[in-house]
Amino acid sequence: MQAGSRMPEQVWLRRLALLAIAALAGLLYAWAIGHDTLEYYYAAADRSMSMSWHDFIFGAFDPAGTITVDKLPGALWLQALSVRAFGMHTWAIILPQVIEGVLTVLVLYRAVARLAGPAAGLIAALVLAVSPATVALNRENISDSLLILLLVLAADAVSGAIAVGVRRPGGILGRLILAGFWVGLAFQAKDIEAWMALPALGLAYLLSGPGSVLRRSGQLAVAGVVVALVSLSWMTAVSLVPAADRPYVDGSHDNSVFAQVFSYNGFARFGDQTPLQVRAAQLNPGTPLPVPARAADRLLNGALGRDTGWLVPAAAAVAVWGIVSRRRQPRGDPLRACFILWGGWLVTFFVVFTAITTLWPYYAAALSPAVAAIIGAGVAAARSRERVPVSRTIGLAVIVAGTAAYAGWLVSSSGGAPGWLVPAIIGVGIVATGVIVCSLVRPRSVPFAAALAAGLVAVALAPAVASVSLAAHSESAFDTPFESARVQEDVALGLGKQAVVALQDTIPFWQDAANGTPYLMAAQSALLPSAIIYDTGLEAVPIGGFDGTTPSPTLAQLQADIRHGLLHLVWISSAASDPRLQWVTTHCIRLTQRLYDCVPSAHGPVPSIGPTPAPSIGSTPVPQPAAPVDAG
């Protein structure tokens, strides 16, 4: 090979650095994933969908395909394929999210490097890889991992359109169409949350793309059509299938996937109780989960602050500085376009997450790519071959010192952080600030690049330690760094996870009590069926779907299932005003406080179940049937 064709040394170093960052991300996301806890509702759907192509296509929750999951199944398709390929294992369900997380790191590098350069891309990739919210999310079976990957791919396509436009006008529309395609696929993964990225993507291209305003607007309109077509394709296809040939759509009261997406999972999340809170109220009337207060700083303090708040204030300040400082550059300036794109992303998601009723920690992971990209681009913009302005150095010192102090406050307000961490944050912050000041006083001895490096170490220390802590303790999407044992227990109770775990030990007794019926049981809401389906792959009918209010099965369908001998055990926490449950309580034999036997007399007796009332774990009562008694 000729010397002129050899790859420059810096390119090799850059690729090795990116490979190391990807390996670090994979290690954090995959460490001991076989010991992580799962979201059992989705895991049960994974098992059902892996057993039947009919259930796979429609996103059925249960093996009999009576009802769908309460969200679009795009992300679950990948999990179900993994289960079909590798078997029903915890690691097989989480593996797709690990891969998606690593790919997101790599794609973010390319997206940022297109506009801000390779160094900025590497910094962005590293910051994203060690973001606690990202690490926690990618260690569980949550749809947001795929959502974020697809949206970052869309941002990469838009960045490519802007970067190409700087050099030549050709190929731009194709990239914008590709961006629309990625957003449409992201919609399949997490409903209308995918569309939250559209303002940032559209604004960045409208302000920084080549050509006239009319031309840019027309190109964005074409991309918007692609977004709509891809987003609504599966929903439209399912709606055209006769209701008798597909599962009932959970989350809707008229068997409509459009109602599920745009009401139940969409605008109803602003002000109304979430499905989880509705389920709690159904199972225990009078003691629903409280609706957390919405506040402008909800993402910046407490558990959510420790999840993703570490660098949000710094990123916001850098984005504003980046846009203002480059206001005199030509319209297609790539660095300014980078700040507009990711700054718009950060603002949009921050505002929406502040306004919605309930915000789970893993939601905040959607902020991480924007924060990482802005920090990387900020470093690239701050570097200068000429004399660095005094104001820039002072601004860096303020951001680093403020971010370190903020991180120390977040850690000190937690209940489970190691005692050495706060002093370490303060110490490293002081040293980094000192280096920055020295670069101002003695620029020849301490170059500004050293000040930037010291600042990066100082602001990244706390979130990096938090991420390592999450991985080391096998924590995942519903966990936040440095939680006390009491807080972790309260979260598990609120989610019903302890109830599900307690039920798993009783499944053999349920199987004996079922007396050979095709369906093991029917139960109020999907809480208990989730554990049964996940553990055994047997059918357990969720009366009312996820939250217990969906009109599936109807009373007539439930009576027909019992009459035809498909099931006879029904678990009810509270009949309340549900006519289906009231019929069970008045027409079936009560075996325990919450368990009823609806078997016709011709089917013979069922094994005896002890009369002790079922205990209540947290907010969810759990049946604990005694071992069957020998009738002979």
Image (tube, grey):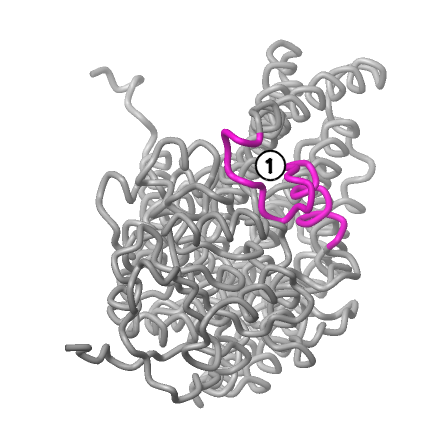
Q: Residue furthest top?
A: 170
- 293 or 318, nearer to the observer: 293
- 174 or 609, nearer to the observer: 609
- The percent position of residue 331, horizontal first and vertical second, equals 78, 28
Tell me the kind of residue under disc 1.
Phe
Against 194, residue 27 (above or below) is below
- 198 or 79, nearer to the observer: 79
Q: Is 516 in the magenta?
A: no
The residue that appears at 53% across and 57% down in the rendered structure is 543
Q: Is residue 365 left or right of residue 390?
A: left
- The percent position of residue 83, horizontal first and vertical second, equals 29, 44
Q: Which residue is mark 1?
A: 187
Q: Residue furthest front?
A: 602
The residue that appears at 54% across and 74% down in the rendered structure is 573
Q: What is the total number of numbered labels drawn onto the structure image?
A: 1
Q: Is 252 in the magenta?
A: yes
Q: Residues within 10 Å of mark 1 (few under 14, many from 20)?
A: many
Against 406, residue 193 (above or below) is above
The residue that appears at 60% across and 14% down in the rendered structure is 174
The residue that appears at 31% across and 50% down in the rendered structure is 518
Quarter occupied by the N terminus: top left
- The percent position of residue 544, horizontal first and vertical second, equals 58, 56
Quarter occupied by the C terminus: bottom left
Against 65, residue 506 (above or below) is below
Q: Is residue 405 left or right of residue 428?
A: right
Against 324, residue 630 (above or below) is below
**Which contiguous range is marked in magenta?**
243-268
